[in-house]
Amino acid sequence: MKKFLKSFSAFLFTLIFTISITVTNNNAVSAAPKHKRIYGKGRYETSASIVNSGWEKSDYAVIASGEGFADALSAAPLAKKYNAPIILTEGKNLNGNAKNQLKRLGVKNVIIVGGTGSISTNAEKQINNLGISTRRIYGNSRFDTSLEVAKEIGIENGIVVTNGLGFADALSMAPIAANKQMPIILTPANNLPKNIKDFINTNPYNKSYILGGSGVVSSTIQDGLKNSKRLYGNSRYDTNAAILKEFAEEVNLDNIYVAAGSNYPDALSGSALAAKTNSPIVLVSNKVEASVMSFIKNKHSNFNNINIIGGSGVVSDTTVKTVVDGKEVGDLKVHYIDVGQGDSILIQQDGHNMLIDAGPNSAETTVANYLKSQGITKLDYIVGTHPHEDHIGGLDKVIDSFEVGRVIMPKATHNTKAFKDVVNSINNKGIKITTPKVGDSYELGNARWQILAPVNASYGNLNNYSIVTKLQFGNNSFIFTGDAESLSEGEILQKQLDISSDVLKVGHHGSKTSTTKNFLNKVSPKYAVITVGKGNSYKHPNQEVLNRLKAKNIKVYRTDENGTIVATSDGTSIRFNKSPGSYKGNDVVTPMSKPTSKSQPKPNIKPQPKPSTKPTVKPKPQSKPQPNYNSGSIYITKSGKKYHRDGCRSLSRSKIAISKQDAINRGYKPCTVCNP
């Protein structure tokens, strides 16, 4: 019995250990693949980076034009034959990056693909001056050049036929054709040129692939080829997916390359590098198209290294994340909620939510209901930009109604009930307030946002405590300014931070105290959103600010005209749910038109009898005018702590109009003289 128990215990231990290893291995497989970008400032710098990534030395190099793809489309199989990189250069002169690579690699032989119209004799001489031998492979047309390359490689392994007037299909196949040593033959859509037809009919080959639908390469051409197979789709990306699927079991999926389907220079240089490791090229647009995404999902577990050819301006960060994660990245939505005269902005990305301000007290239900209508139960971040009631008035209800991750507010207090209510709600939930620090950044799903202000710890004006943030999603960016005024904007500029953005939330509801010329120039937005109340007593937005926006052709969206505005970004482009608003400021009074003489009927005036002369009555002296205590306007002063009626003797000339409720919310007390 003891022996049995001992054996059984050993068996259980072995079983548990095996299961543990299996689970560990499964977890290891599911880990996200590594990824890196191979890029430079331009196509020639990117070409040099690609060469640096794949070759330390090479006796051969293939030189192709970076200005036109026609001759170079068939270059990848040629480069593979000589284990050579494809180096791009300008047509008229040898580019400095190309020159440096030729010297670094110790190249002895250069094959120029294309005639002197592609790579000039001057550029060739500059290569020769480096002590390098050159020879050209070219023809009278792109079709003839592809034929000459085919003769250099041979067609015994098969051929690839594609339309020579496009580049995407050829580049999709380039690294695969290179490894199979199958030349890429270019053709017009309808018929193979006679010289190409004669060549393939007199030389044996065992397989042919046609890239593209019958509108790209006709059925007539396919009928004349041996053992042919057409790989195609409704777009260049669908064709790329068809190629990837066809050769998935033959290529090295451990190491893949991602390139833009609309940018041939990067993919051309990259095709030689991909061929070096028998890796495929995945083509993407500003997103990953559905057919390509299907392939990625199906084979994602095989990916260990993903190489992105080109910078974020060519292949966006959002697109890269989609490939790396093996799942689509959802859109980013920015909701500028109409709360009247105030701010409330909801940001959403892939199930993550952030709220910047919640409008005045009067709009707290509006904000809470809007959040619920968007299916929100949790806010990852709440930002209370500064303590004014028109920004934080509704925050207490929001905090009470939703699960909250983090609350970020400046180190500024206010003696108003609105501010105290927010603090009480925060304390009741046991949340610790995070103080903003310039440069701190946070993730919101696949987006990232960074704090730009406040720069200093103390200000005389509460508006300048406003938390200013920049949100980045793929290649799109947004700036949110609260009520930050010119002082804060100047401090941000002095920090020399990157504040360039597609969308600017105009500061302080379009007041002339914000959106200075220098700040606007640095942000350089395409769109501006003004959160402002219809018919507000402050006369926001100011015409001067709107004139600045109009002068720079910035499209303006306004909550007083548009209601709630929603901007949607896919990481590359931004669309709005409303049409742009006007450039008319609320501080501009439209003069009443004077009646014209034509539009008015002539009065029928009858002669009146001459009045009898009466003795002149001497006017009585007027009493001293009394203060107008019945006026509905409330006024404050810059230095005072009380609010007054118009005409109050305690009111200085530098009076500022304000609503009574706002005066109370800001801590002002009623004047005891005029009793407003």
Image (cartoon, rainbow, N blue to C red):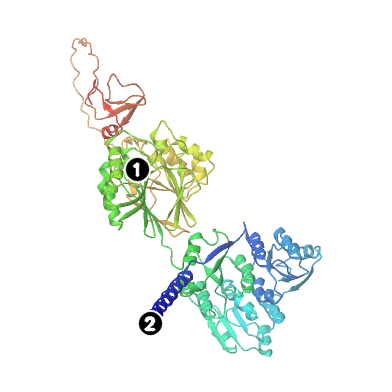
* Quadrant in the picture for residue 97: bottom right
Is label 1 in contact with label 2 (beta carbons under 8 Å)? no
Give the residue drawn at x 27%, y 25%.
Answer: 644
Q: Quadrant of residue 223?
A: bottom right
Figure check: 278 above or below 546: below
Labels 1, 2: front one:
2
Q: Does residue 64 lie above or below 443 as drawn?
A: below
Check disc 1 and report its element: helix, strand or loop: loop
Q: Which mark is residue 532?
A: 1
Q: Quadrant of residue 375?
A: bottom left
Q: Is 137 in front, or is 299?
A: 299
Q: Residues within 10 Å of mark 1 (few under 14, many from 20)?
A: many
Helix, strand or loop under label 2: helix
Split into 4 quadrants, where in the image is the C terminus? top left
Q: Height in image: 12 above or below 664?
A: below
Q: Which mark is residue 4?
A: 2
Mark 2 Cα within 10 Å, few/some/many (few <14, many 20+)?
A: few
86 sits to left or right of 626 = right
Residue 103 shows in the view: yes
Provide residue 396's location: percent of width, then percent of height.
28, 44
Position in image of residue 342 (x %, y %): 33, 42
Viewer-side residue, 317 vs 300: 300
Q: Is residue 360 visible?
A: no
